[in-house]
Image (cartoon, rainbow, N blue to C red):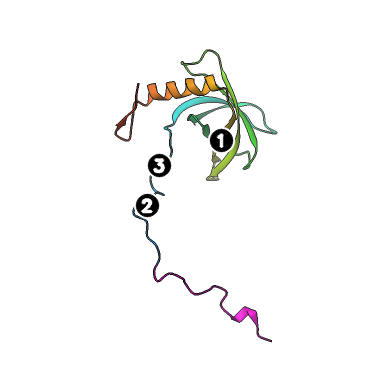
Amino acid sequence: MTDRRTKPRRKPALMAKSITRKVERRGEDRRDCPRCEIALDVREPRRKARAVIGDLSIGGVSYVTTAPPLGDVVSVMFTIPTYVGPIIASGIVVARHGAEKGAQVSIVFTDLEIEAELAIAQWIDREMPIVQGVELAA
């Protein structure tokens, strides 16, 4: 009987050399929509509601916090000039980065009214008219 621990586990490389990308995407911003800084009222599970400064996009928000873990549902409330009254939206935590003084969490909206989404898009267009040298339609 042969000892499996001494044999190499990986198969020989199928390709002669590794594939290189034409453009490295890790260092640049890969978002489809720009983000605008905004005051948020955040309601995380098992914590009191609190006010934070975060970044808003059409699809979600991000902010710094010590909780919640990935997959938790978070509720946020905020106001923007292109919408009458506060916008209340729910979302799921899809990413966490950093841990020293809190993590930057990314929330993707799962419950947002279409009128609110359109108002967010109009507000972002007004606040960020030029993105990476490309002028957006007004």
Which quadrant would the N terminus be assigned to in this image? bottom right
Q: What type is the residue that disc 1 sits on?
A: Ile
Is residue 15 located in the magenta-colored stretch of the structure? yes
Is residue 29 located in the magenta-colored stretch of the structure? no
Circle 2 residues within 10 Å: few <14, some 14–19, many ≥20: few
Q: Give the farthest residue toward the front.
A: 14
Q: Nearer the viewer, residue 27 or 18?
A: 18
Answer yes or no: do the residues labelled 3 and 2 have beta carbons within 8 Å? Answer: no
Identify the residue shown where x is 60% and y is 81%. 6
Res 41 label: none
The secondary structure type at the circle numbered 1 is strand
Res 107 label: 1
Identify the residue shown where x is 34% and y is 52%. 23
Q: In the figure, is residue 14 to the left or right of 20?
A: right
Q: Which residue is mark 2?
A: 24
Q: Nearer the viewer, residue 101 or 107?
A: 107
Dominant secondary structure of the magenta stretch? loop
